[in-house]
Amino acid sequence: MTRGKMWIGALATALAAALWPAAAFAGLYETLSGEQVTWMPAPEKPAEPPKEGEAPAEPAKPTIRELFLTPPAKTKYFDYRVEPVVLIRTIFATTLEDKYKIPGQEEPLDSTTMQPSALGHREGFILDNVELGLKGRFNDSGLYYQLKMELAPREKNGNASADYLKDAYLGWNKYSVADIRIGRMKIPFSQANMKPTEDMPLINTPLANLLVPKRQIGAMVSIGDPWQVVKLRGGVFNSTELAVEQLLSFDQLAYVGRGEIYVDKLLDALSANFLDFEFMLGGGILHTEQNFDPSTQHRWRGIDGRLHLWIFTVEGEYVWKDFLLDDGSADQGYGWYADLTIHAWPTVIDVTGRIEQMDGDKEVRGFSTTLVIDELTPQKKRWITGGVTLHVAEQARFAANYVMREELEGFKFKNGMFMGMLQFNL
């Protein structure tokens, strides 16, 4: 080997030895995080401030792929943390006055001596809810789950409840524009139907919500845009627990669709929402058939909305339903409510008023269906409710409500009812 070649080899070796550490460590750092090795680029040199008279550089706009397909960065494939789901509600209810009407007379009535189902409400101290469950997710996979059970046997709306299983579903929402869920869950028909019990502004659920099936086994798909201005939901659910009915055909399946538009999100996207403002409009449709005697079709339609401005929140909903028989005869029902909440001391004290009316059926039918959850539901009624909610802590609240009830059909009566509630939830 000549001396020139030796010098060239030595020089190449020296350059490689000098540049290899810089190439290996100056551009990349290695981090070990659980089961995954994540390579992250070295911190970039901060941009120099603009010179006097120059406009600052505009940030780069996200690409279509970044908007629609890029999931949030994660450092672990799996997250084994499990969050508990807890809801405990204790209610005290007392009727202040009862009067019922029968042909030709009106007499006072002591509701404490009767079955709760006769008047459609409850008396005394009631352990209303004891819900326990688990929820969690696998981060990078986009999978999440929830399992929740009701442990307190109770009597609600005059119907002894045997519904111990609340939620049991598995979902996937890796990307912000789509959500797929399968299992037992709430039917996505209206905002009142989907609102969690612990978030209700008053103790009682709206009467209109009694007209709509609550939870069933099925599958749901939700899609929207990256700015969350529009959201569309659709699903297929079981509508009956009768095995014979399920074996006859798939006609008994309930098909549901719902759309929502968020005006405040649109203003956010346009950088024009400078107020404490939220505005949502939504609507839903639901259809199912039941083939046992008599064969019926059930159709629901509803519109709802929510407006929040400063310390005021207004919510409302209108639901109407149709029953169709084989001979073509039809029956109809409807329900509506309007809530006004004043956040007198935001996050601490809320004052809420509600007016509502519901008529489950225009006619008294000689049969019932598995979708009617209350023997008093078909009867026309009008309620006016006022209440105060004290948020003792983030997980605990106390509420006091006064309800002016007027039953306008069937077993007619008027009364005033006071209700108090203590709630704890995680």
Image: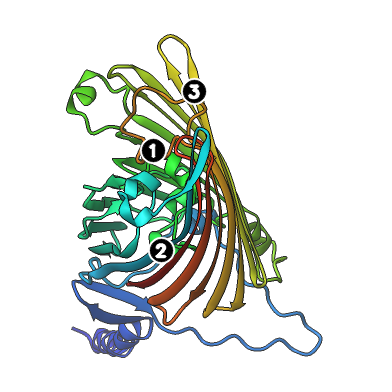
- Quick check: 10 above or below 385? below
- Mark 3 vs 1, N-terminal side: 1
Say which of marks 2 and 1 sits in front: 2
CB under 8 Å between discs 3 and 2: no
- The quadrant holding residue 80 is bottom left
> Compared with residue 117, is residue 299 higher up or lower down, i.e. above or below?
above
Among the 4 quarters of the image, the one containing residue 420: bottom left
Q: Secondary structure at mark 1?
A: strand
| Residue drawn at point x = 23 percent, y = 79 percent | 32
Marks 3 and 1 sit apart, C-alpha to C-alpha, by: 25 Å
Does residue 173 show up? no
Q: CA distance from mark 3 to mark 2?
A: 35 Å
Label 2 vs 1, first from the N-terminus: 2
Q: Residues within 10 Å of mark 3 (few under 14, many from 20)?
A: some
Residue 97 visible, this orientation: yes
Q: Nearer the viewer, residue 372 or 186?
A: 372
Image location of residue 194, percent across then percent down: 43, 51
Q: Which mark is residue 94?
A: 2
What number is the disc on residue 331? 3
- Give, as a three-letter code, the residue at label 3: Asp
For mark 2, give the secondary structure: strand
Q: Nearer the viewer, residue 77 or 180?
A: 180
Give percent across and percent down for residue 16: 29, 85
Is 283 on the left or on the right of 80, as rendered?
right
Residue at point 78%, 90% (across, down) = 52
Quadrant placement of the N terminus: bottom left
Residue topped by disc 1: 235
Nearer mark to the viewer, of 3 and 1: 3
Residue 132 numbered tag? none
Type of amino acid at the residue the image marks with label 1: Gly
Q: Closer to the N terminus: mark 3 or mark 2? A: 2
Q: Amino acid at mark 2?
A: Thr
